[in-house]
Amino acid sequence: MNHFALNGVISPQELYYYALRAVAMLIVIPFHESAHALISWKLGDSTAKDMGRLSMNPLRHFDPLGALCMIAAGVGWAKPVGINPTRFKNPKRGMAVSAAAGPLSNFLLAYAAMLLFYDWRLALLSLLRRPSWCWISFMF
């Protein structure tokens, strides 16, 4: 096994791992925070929309230190979405539903990623089961 490191600091496998974390962060954090903003807006509070947080632009949601921690340690945070509970018809229910929207969006993304990975894996396995001469036709 080749264990060369980039200037002795980080291996290519580790670099790949951190790059995957960064790409995941670019997708997950805006989706999570936008879910909070969207639900609070749908329930009557326009605070997050007025602040420009009803967006999938990662720069609107990232906290620099939280993003760095997410890449380095796998645990981080984003800027909190502003919500004014007094604008909800039922403030307790509105806050509960708005708070639950972010974690529910995480489950939705995890499920979508699972389906994507599962389909990709099945496609790869079906290619591996073919005779070797079929690979030539697949390449062209």
Image (spheres, rainbow, N blue to C red):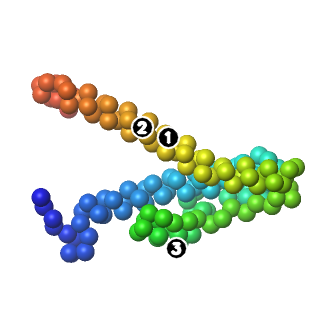
Amino acid type, mark 3: Leu
Q: Which mark is residue 102?
A: none
Q: Which mark is residue 65?
A: 3
**Disc 1 secondary structure class:** helix
Using residue 92 as the reference point, say whether residue 125 is left or right of it. Answer: left
Look at 44% across and 63% down and name the residue there.
Answer: 74
Badges 2 and 3: C-beta atoms under 8 Å apart? no
Q: Residues within 10 Å of mark 3 (few under 14, many from 20)?
A: few
Residue 109 at x, y = what percent? Answer: 52, 45
Q: What whole-number distance in Å separates the C-alpha atoms at marks 1 and 3?
A: 28 Å
Image vertical order of residue 129 relative to residue 60, above or below: above
Q: What whole-number distance in Å separates the C-alpha atoms at marks 2 and 3?
A: 30 Å
The residue that mark 1 highlights is 111
Sequence-first disc among 1 and 3:
3
Look at 26% across and 70% down and name the residue there.
Answer: 10
Look at 50% across and 52% down and name the residue there.
Answer: 27
Amino acid type, mark 1: Tyr
**Disc 3 secondary structure class:** helix
The residue that mark 2 highlights is 116
Look at 86% across and 59% down and name the residue there.
Answer: 86
Using residue 87 as the reference point, say whether residue 127 is left or right of it. Answer: left
Residue 19 at x, y = what percent? Answer: 37, 60
Amino acid type, mark 2: Leu
Residue 101 at x, y = what percent? Answer: 66, 49
Badges 1 and 3: C-beta atoms under 8 Å apart? no
